[in-house]
Structures are given as structure tokens and as C-alpha cells.
């Protein structure tokens, strides 16, 4: 690298990180909306018409029409941001994804600023955040996760600086940011105990900083009261009850959930896995690796069963097992990094980073309704800082690494993250294309055509004029056509006795790497679809099954 460029980067780290983030995410701006994106867009559209009543409309998201305040489990700040962005830029994919570049940049820059306080190589920490699979995928959605993380990181920045300088104004700003984080995604409430614990360790007692934590608590109380007044339901309490209900009906064992959480941690924060050879001595690495493999294997054979996930035409169970154990070892490595840092030094910063990582892991594995990449995302900045701190401590201890070791590890992580992001992009493109091809074939038969399934397929089908089947109210009758996207949720085939014939529409998506496909055990957005955050294997095409109902005979039963 020429000296002038190196000097400019050192003098302008924020601009450098902004340009790099834009360069990495710009190729994905045209990604079609998918998974839960439609929920946020529909709420944003309603906000434009009824700004004080964000959830006051109905939606068919679970197979029947329900109020939106029952269908969504997220607070509205991200939706208000979407509504504002759309008012300025429009509702296209490129416009809304461009608007969500700002939260992504805020996370990267916030990590750099926070790392300046906690370690000596803030640029490396910021790039480590950028080049993780979970961050790139989450930054390509219009959901609330990256925005919540942006508020999270900057609240930690203002809080730690406010505590260090006894600056009540910064603490107050941090309190407002915590409130915004919580009203963007409920997990933001975990900042309150996290920063309270940090402050108690740092100041050795209560201080007026505690008053600033009342700000997010007051915001939550106001939100509870407002939603109860509008909808007869306190939405924060309902989200907690929903998570407990879903965990109860899935019937997944604790061992299996723990293994899945470790696998998701290792895969989603893969940068930590690729830096492991640089963080541990060879002897320790061998002992740790052997122990981790044994633990992962024991957990796997105890609880994880792949037969219900994979297709023998797509991949083999052995190959899936190898991927699960590999990433579970990486997940154990992430947790070990936090434990080792806490073991060596127990100051307020160490406690902050350790609780940050373990709190996120605990939520993802125990309290959330399913393990998913979006629940792992909040730990990424803390893990990145832990990696850099460990590298610096090793350097002080006299470790000698090749000059290319760190760049190579970061490059490998970047390559994987980009591959996974591209796979998720291709999945969304294929999903939209199935809707387009369905319209090309049946656009003139919309009165006799119904579809099941949700996510991006529903968004584009409805935008093309098709109607989602309401299993309780839709007047489906003999002679109708029913479409079911195979790789989707909320689908159930009709009664075979009522079906005259069956066809399919197939669209090629990602070929050998998937983020959400039950046939290769990939379940980035919900581990109920698979125990891997992403999976290598022969990925089947996106398929829409078409059921042509008999012109006479029994009507398909309600699902």
C-alpha cells in the first residue's frame, strides 16, 4: 500500500470505514424484500397514513387475517424510519436498502470509536464487525436489527464516556439512545442491566448515573400504556409471552438448542473462528480444539437430529454434521475468548464485554422463541474488540506473527461473509422471481387463484394482484388453483381427493450455499428450518407447487 494512501487512512479512519462499508453493501442494494421485511414495510405504509396508530390495520401473516398488532412482535421505531425514508426516496428496494445503509455505517463507526477506548487497533475491530456473515446479511434487510445495534453501540459509547468523565449530559444522551434501541427491538432493554453492571464496577456504587436509566424505563412504560390504550394489548408483555409460547410448542430439547446456539454463534461471527489460530498458542489450541470437538460431538449425538431437515438429493447427513461441529467449535471459541479475558483481568471494561457476549448468547439460546442470526448479531462488536485485545496482549507477551497473518484471517472472513450474503441475495431474487413467473402464467386467472406462504413471496404476489388464502374466510371452491411455495412458512397442501392435478414452477437460486432452506438444514432466520445459520450443499431450486382443484367434488378442507 503506498505511503500516501496509508497516511490518508490513518488520518481519516471514519471516512475510510464509511467508503469500505458502502463499497461492500452497495452491490446488494437491489435485493428483493424477503422474510419479515414485508411486515416492516406494511407498518411503515400505515404510518404514513396514520402516524399515531402504526399497527391499526389487518394482515394475513399466519394463514388468516388478524390485526397487525397481533402479527408483529417488534416495536415501531424502524418502521417510522422506513416511513420517513420512503416519503423522501420512494418504496423501491434500492431506495429503502439505501436508507438502511446509515444504521450499518453507524455500527461500523461506533465500533471504531468504542474500540479506541478499549483497544489499540480500532480499525481492525471495525473491519472485523463489517466482515461477519451476520452483519452483512442483516444490513441487507429493512428489518430492525442493525438499527437497534447502532443505537446499542452508541449508547454504550456515550454511557462509558459519561461515566469516565462524570458527564451527566452524555449519560442522558445514552439514556435516550437506550430508549430508542428498546423501541426499535425489544432486546435493547438488556442495555439497562448491562450498563448498570458496568457502572457499579467502575464507580463502586450508585451515583446519579442511575437516574439516566429511568429514561428508557419511562419510555417502555409509556409504550406499554400507549399500545394497551390503542389495541387493548400491551405489546412488550405480549412479545415476552409469545416467545415463551413458541418455545413451549416446538418441543426441541435443551441440548439441541444449546448446540444450535453454539453453531449459530460460530457461523454468524465466523471472523472469530478464522482468527483463532492467531489468538491461542498451538498447545492450547490443540487442547481446546479437541475438547471443543468432543463437547460438540456429545451435544450433537445427544440432541440434534438431521433426518427431518436434509434431503438426500441435496446433501449428506455426514457433511451436515461436519459443518455443525465445525461452527459449534467456533461458537465455543467465541465464549472462551470472553471467559479468558475475564479470567485475566476483571475491570469494568472486561465485565462489560463479557456480559455483552454472554447476555446475547443467553437470550439467543434460552429466551428467544427460536435461535436465529438476528439474535446473535448484537454480540458482534464486543467479539471484535475481544479479538483485538487478545492479539495485542499476545504481542506484548512476545508472540511473533507473520505480517500477513491478520490480513489473511480478515480476508478469509470477508470472503465467507460475502459468499453468504450473496447466497441470501440469490434466495431473495429467486423468491421474487417465482411470484413473477406465477403472474406470467396465471395473471389472467386471479379471481380463481389463491396462494399460501408468506415472507417475500407474499409481498410480491400481493403486489401483482394475487390474494393470500385465508383458511377461515377465503371462498375457495372447486376449479380454483392454489399455489404453495415449498421453501416457505404457513403452507399446507390441499386434500388430495380435491386435487385434479399438480404442477410446479421452479426458479434457480443459490447453488451450493444457502441461508434458509430446510433441505440443506440452513435456518439463518429461524433454526426451526435448520440447525445451521448457513449451509454448504447442493441447494434445490425455489419451487412453487400448483394444485388444480377438481371442478366438481369436495372442497379442500380448511388447514
Image (cartoon, rainbow, N blue to C red):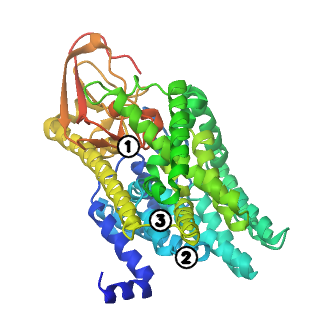
Q: Is residue 352 visible?
A: yes
In the image, what residue occupies the spot 73% across and 82% down?
A: 165
- Position of 550 with respect to 490 (left or right) is left
The answer to whether 169 is drawn above or below residue 401 in the figure is below
- SS for callout 2: loop
- SS for callout 3: helix
Q: What is the number of the mark on residue 534?
A: 1
The answer to whether 106 is drawn above or below residue 57 in the figure is below
Q: What is the number of the mark on residue 285?
A: none
- Pick whichever, 363 or 464, lies toward us: 363
Q: Quadrant of residue 120?
A: bottom right
In the image, what residue occupies the spot 63% across and 69% down?
A: 156
- Residue 207 screen position, x and y as percent: 84, 72
The answer to whether 464 is drawn above or below residue 93 in the figure is above
Distance between the Cα atoms at labels 2 and 3?
35 Å
- Pick whichever, 344 or 359, lies toward us: 344
> What crowding class fits label 1: few (fewer than 14 Cα within 10 Å), some (14-19), or many (20 or more)?
many
- Position of 275 with respect to 479 (left or right) is right
In the image, what residue occupies the spot 21% across and 20% down?
A: 479
Q: Quadrant of the C terminus?
A: top left
Which residue was labeled with disc 2? 120
Observer-side mark, 2 or 3, equals 2
Q: Is residue 521 visible?
A: no
Which residue was labeled with disc 3? 81
> What crowding class fits label 3: few (fewer than 14 Cα within 10 Å), some (14-19), or many (20 or more)?
some
Amino acid at each position: 500500500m503506498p505511503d500516501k494512501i496509508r497516511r490518508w487512512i490513518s488520518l481519516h479512519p471514519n471516512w475510510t470505514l464509511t467508503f469500505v462499508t458502502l463499497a461492500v453493501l452497495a452491490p446488494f442494494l437491489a435485493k428483493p424484500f424477503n422474510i419479515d421485511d414485508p411486515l416492516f414495510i406494511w407498518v411503515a405504509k400505515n404510518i404514513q397514513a396514520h402516524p399515531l396508530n402504526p399497527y391499526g390495520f389487518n394482515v394475513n401473516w399466519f394463514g388468516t387475517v388478524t390485526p397487525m398488532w397481533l402479527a408483529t412482535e417488534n416495536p415501531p421505531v424502524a418502521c417510522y424510519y422506513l416511513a420517513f425514508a420512503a416519503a423522501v426516496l420512494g418504496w423501491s428496494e434500492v431506495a429503502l436498502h439505501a436508507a438502511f445503509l446509515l444504521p450499518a455505517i453507524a455500527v461500523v463507526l461506533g465500533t471504531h470509536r468504542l474500540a479506541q477506548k478499549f483497544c489499540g487497533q480500532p480499525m481492525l475491530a471495525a473491519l472485523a464487525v463489517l466482515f461477519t456473515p451476520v452483519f452483512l446479511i442483516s444490513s441487507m434487510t429493512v428489518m430492525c436489527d442493525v438499527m437497534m445495534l447502532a443505537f446499542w453501540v452508541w449508547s454504550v459509547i456515550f454511557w462509558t464516556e459519561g461515566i469516565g468523565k462524570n458527564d451527566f449530559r452524555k449519560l442522558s444522551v445514552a439514556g435516550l439512545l437506550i430508549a430508542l434501541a428498546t423501541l426499535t427491538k425489544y432486546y435493547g432493554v438488556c442495555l439497562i442491566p448491562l450498563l448498570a453492571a458496568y457502572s457499579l464496577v467502575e464507580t463502586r456504587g450508585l451515583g446519579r448515573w442511575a437516574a439516566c436509566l429511568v429514561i428508557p424505563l419511562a419510555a417502555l412504560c409509556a409504550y406499554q400504556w400507549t399500545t394497551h390504550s390503542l389495541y387493548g394489548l400491551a405489546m412488550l408483555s405480549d412479545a415476552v409471552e409469545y416467545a415463551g409460547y413458541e418455545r413451549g410448542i416446538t418441543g426441541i430439547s435443551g441440548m439441541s438448542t444449546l448446540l444450535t446456539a453454539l453453531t449459530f454463534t460460530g457461523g454468524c461471527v465466523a471472523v472469530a473462528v478464522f482468527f483463532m489460530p492467531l489468538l491461542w498458542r498451538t498447545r492450547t489450541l490443540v487442547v481446546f480444539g479437541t475438547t471443543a470437538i468432543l463437547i460438540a460431538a456429545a451435544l450433537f449425538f445427544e440432541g440434534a437430529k438431521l433426518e427431518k431437515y436434509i434431503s438426500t438429493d441435496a446433501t449428506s447427513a455426514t457433511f451436515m454434521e461436519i459443518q455443525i461441529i465445525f461452527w459449534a467449535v467456533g461458537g465455543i471459541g467465541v465464549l472462551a475468548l470472553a471467559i479468558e479475558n475475564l479470567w485475566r483481568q476483571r475491570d469494568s471494561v472486561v465485565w462489560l464485554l463479557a456480559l455483552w457476549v454472554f447476555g446475547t448468547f443467553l437470550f439467543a439460546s434460552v429466551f428467544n422463541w427460536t435461535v436465529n442470526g438476528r439474535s446473535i448479531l448484537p454480540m458482534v462488536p464486543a467479539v471484535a474488540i475481544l479479538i483485538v485485545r487478545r492479539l495485542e496482549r499476545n504481542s506484548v507477551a512476545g508472540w511473533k506473527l507473520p505480517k500477513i497473518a491478520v490480513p489473511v484471517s480478515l480476508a478469509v472472513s470477508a470472503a465467507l461473509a460475502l459468499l453468504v450474503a450473496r447466497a441470501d441475495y440469490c434466495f431473495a431474487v429467486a423468491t421474487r422471481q417465482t411470484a413473477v413467473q406465477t403472474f406470467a402464467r396465471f395473471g389472467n386467472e386471479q379471481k380463481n387463484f389463491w396462494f399460501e406462504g408468506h415472507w417475500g413471496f407474499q409481498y410480491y404476489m400481493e403486489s401483482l394482484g394475487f390474494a393470500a388464502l385465508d383458511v377461515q374466510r377465503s371462498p375457495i371452491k372447486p376449479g380454483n388453483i392454489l399455489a404453495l411455495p415449498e421453501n416457505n412458512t404457513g403452507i399446507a397442501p390441499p386434500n388430495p381427493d380435491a386435487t385434479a392435478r399438480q404442477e410446479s414452477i421452479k426458479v434457480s437460486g443459490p447453488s451450493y450455499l444457502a441461508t434458509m432452506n430446510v433441505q440443506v438444514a440452513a435456518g439463518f432466520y429461524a433454526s426451526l428450518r435448520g440447525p445451521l445459520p448457513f449451509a454448504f450443499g447442493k441447494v434445490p431450486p425455489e419451487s412453487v407447487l400448483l394444485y388444480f382443484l377438481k371442478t366438481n367434488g369436495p372442497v379442500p378442507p380448511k388447514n
